[in-house]
Image (spheres, rainbow, N blue to C red):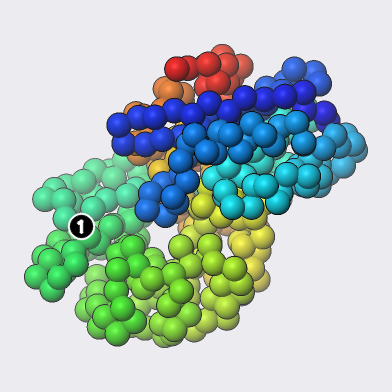
Amino acid sequence: MRILGGAAHPAYGPNRQFVRLGLRDEHRRLGIGEASPLPPFSADVASVLAVVLGEAFPDLATTADDLPPREAVAAAMAPVERALAPYPAARFALETALFDVVGRRRGLSVAACLAGADRLAVVPTNALLDASAPDLVERARGVAEAGLHAVKVKLRARDEAGFERELAALRALRNALPLPFELRLDPNGAWTVAEAHEKLARLAEVAPRYVEQPVPAALLPDLGPAAVPWAADESLLLPGMAERLARAEGCAAFILKPAALGGLDRALAVAAIGAAAGLDLVVTHFADGPVGLAAAAELARALPKPPLACGLEPHPGLSAYPAMAIPQRGRPGTVREAALPGLGFSEEARTRWITTD
């Protein structure tokens, strides 16, 4: 495989900036990728990422067609890894586009490139709700009626009165949707370790599957066993943290965001650590656009064990991106293999991705 060249176009919406990436191989096959840095988790700006990616294209290595797909992509990226190291969103975009090209060359989905015959046919998805929404229960009922079996609820309160209101809303939700309907909670690392233990004990009555990232990233290994299980998200971005958390008492799951982790292959490596420790796995988008969301869906189908319902439902932020149907969207509450190889997009959709102003 030889990459002839590519383009990286920054785009700026009212609430999101991103980079649309496209590259072509020697047969003019088009592979696409997306870099969508998400403040405050990333300080990157689209204009800088576009320059970094533009400078990387000429240095991509030519690779032999008999290499396994993951090895082929790794070999192609080897010359630019150092330059991309500070920019995980850019690395994710370029790696995604290369997997897209390799998949198209070989007639394989990206999930098949990542996992071969062990890929999953279908993965369940969960919905994302907000505990502060006045219609939380009605929205959750609508999710269940649509065929989904799990919701993740963001906890926004930062004072005791607000937490009490959110807890009351969660009680009402649980009364409306009893077990086995799955409830997951996410306070976005807002609590201290002591606060987390106190609040997790109070949340036990609503029987969450887990509470995601209860404390800041660096403090999560200090949390230990709690009244309800907890899951690691942003902590997994810290070097060596996946290995520590895989051994930590109380940790129930790894939440994998390939755009934040710097790519599909890196996310699979973290998933392997979690799976080996018996932890549950969940793939979720990073409020990505359609290309990033399709790539995350391919990762979910390539995991070393079947995941819990994944955060891969369409989200309102997609309106900032070129309109493109997600090829992996199946029946409500699922993602499945797309009809076309690579990321599954049609040639028309790919062209629109790289040419839309």
Instruction: Name the residue: 35% across, 77% down.
Output: 228
Q: Residue at x 13, y 48 (%)?
A: 135
User: How far across and how far down the image is residue 31, in percent?
Assistant: 66, 27
Q: Is residue 164 left or right of residue 317?
A: left
Residue depicted at 59% across the width and 52% down the height: 86
Specify whether residue 103 is in view.
Answer: no
The image quarter in which residue 59 lies? top right
Counting every numbered tag in the picture gives 1
Q: Residue 317's x, y, as percent?
A: 34, 36
- Circle 1 residue: 131
Q: Residue at x 52, y 38 (%)?
A: 48
- What amino acid is at disc 1? Ala
| Up/down of 199 relative to 280, above or below | below
Residue 235: give x, y in percent of width and height: 48, 67
Viewport quadrant of the N terminus: top right
Q: Position of residue 82 (x, y in %)?
A: 70, 51
**SS assignment at label 1:** loop
Q: Seen in the image, is 280 located left or right of residue 166?
A: right
Q: Is residue 101 above or below residue 301?
A: above
